[in-house]
Amino acid sequence: FLAGFHLGLPTAVTGPYDPAHGTYGNIVAILVVLLISWLLNRGMRESMRINNAIVIVKIAIIILFVLVGIFYVKPANWQPFAPFGSKGILRGASTVFFAYLGFDVVSASAAEVKNPKKNMPIGIIGTLIVASVLYMLVAVVLTGMVHYTKLNVADPVAFALTLVHQNWTSGIISLGALAGMFTMMVTMIYSSSRLIYSIGRDGLLPKFLGKIDTSNGTPKNSLAVITVVIALLGGFVPLAQLTNLVNIGTLVAFLFVSFGIIRLRHIKELPENSGFKVPWYPVLPIVSGLLCFGMMLQLPAETWIASSIWFALGLVIYFTYGLRHSRLNDDLPK
């Protein structure tokens, strides 16, 4: 995008830390994370107003691609329809599972939702349906325009439009891709800071992380910590390694949530009508947990090793600090 305006950056600051290929850090990634953090620190209402406007633009651009691209679809490009079979479909799902990260954000913002019992299920299920339909429409049109063997590029949608000489649409799609990444980052940095705030408030992490800035109602400390971590990872770790770690981390979280629901239903201290209940219990939680585990098995061995080290670090923090400082200890008999 910058190159289109003749604003090329030195190679050394355009990629992860990889001296062999002449890159030492992605300065754009770091600056974008800092910009989003500053935006979120100004207050939730202002941040979401900007985010919602960009989301509308992003969806409009997706619909534009579908409407333009459908005229260039060649059914012969869909043959064979599933070239890698069911195993390939499962492997592909595990590889792009991070694309479904945003749907748990609603649960992370429960404390700021009006009538969460009603609105949270609508938010999660509604966005899940809309996004899934858009994903499928784009996949059908894209693979109909260009045979899948030619789509192993960084920008497949723009590439497909360029092949059919729709360069003006390709440029707009590139802007839409940037908008999509921006809104995703706003959503995830927001939800991550709220998650760390909640854990700090419960005593499982240092208490300063569970404090709210009274001037604008944002968890300033947890947002600062999350910003530093994301900026370092995004700036210096290769994208392929990051996506695999995010995939397995998300699958582990969803796995625990799925099977954790079974345990929660048997805790008598929880009020019966305290919130939304998962339907088709216990079949749906079990199927969900097994599918998550099945997709985890499709990820490479190095991802399992890295995630095991990360998970072990979390256990060390929990048993050395969280377990002793948890607010649940206040409710136990002395």
Image (cartoon, rainbow, N blue to C red):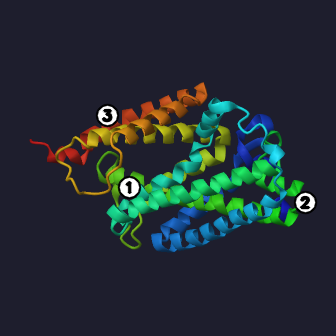
Determine whether label 1 and label 2 are within 8 Å by CB.
Answer: no
Residue at x 54% of width, y 26% of height: 305
Determine whether label 3 and label 2 are within 8 Å by CB.
Answer: no
Determine which residue is flagged by label 2.
165
Determine which residue is flagged by label 1.
197
Considering every residue shown, the one lying at the far front of the view is 75
Give the percent coordinates (x, y) of residue 314. 41, 36
The residue tagged with tag 3: helix, strand or loop?
A: helix
Q: Is residue 56 left or right of residue 47?
A: right
Q: Nearer the viewer, residue 256 or 208?
A: 256
Give the percent coordinates (x, y) of residue 245. 56, 38
Upstream in the sequence, badge 3 or badge 1? 1
**For mark 2, does the 10 Å Cα neighbourhood hold few (<14), some (14 to 19), or many (20 or more) residues?**
few
Inspect the image, locate mark 2, and give the three-letter code of the amino acid beneath it. Answer: His
Inspect the image, locate mark 3, and give the three-letter code of the amino acid beneath it. Answer: Phe
Camera-near label (3 vs 2) is: 2
Inspect the image, locate mark 1, and give the three-letter code of the amino acid beneath it. Answer: Tyr
Q: In the rendered image, is residue 238 in sight?
A: no
Camera-near label (1 vs 2) is: 2
Determine which residue is flagged by label 3.
319
> Residue 239: which quarter of the image?
top right
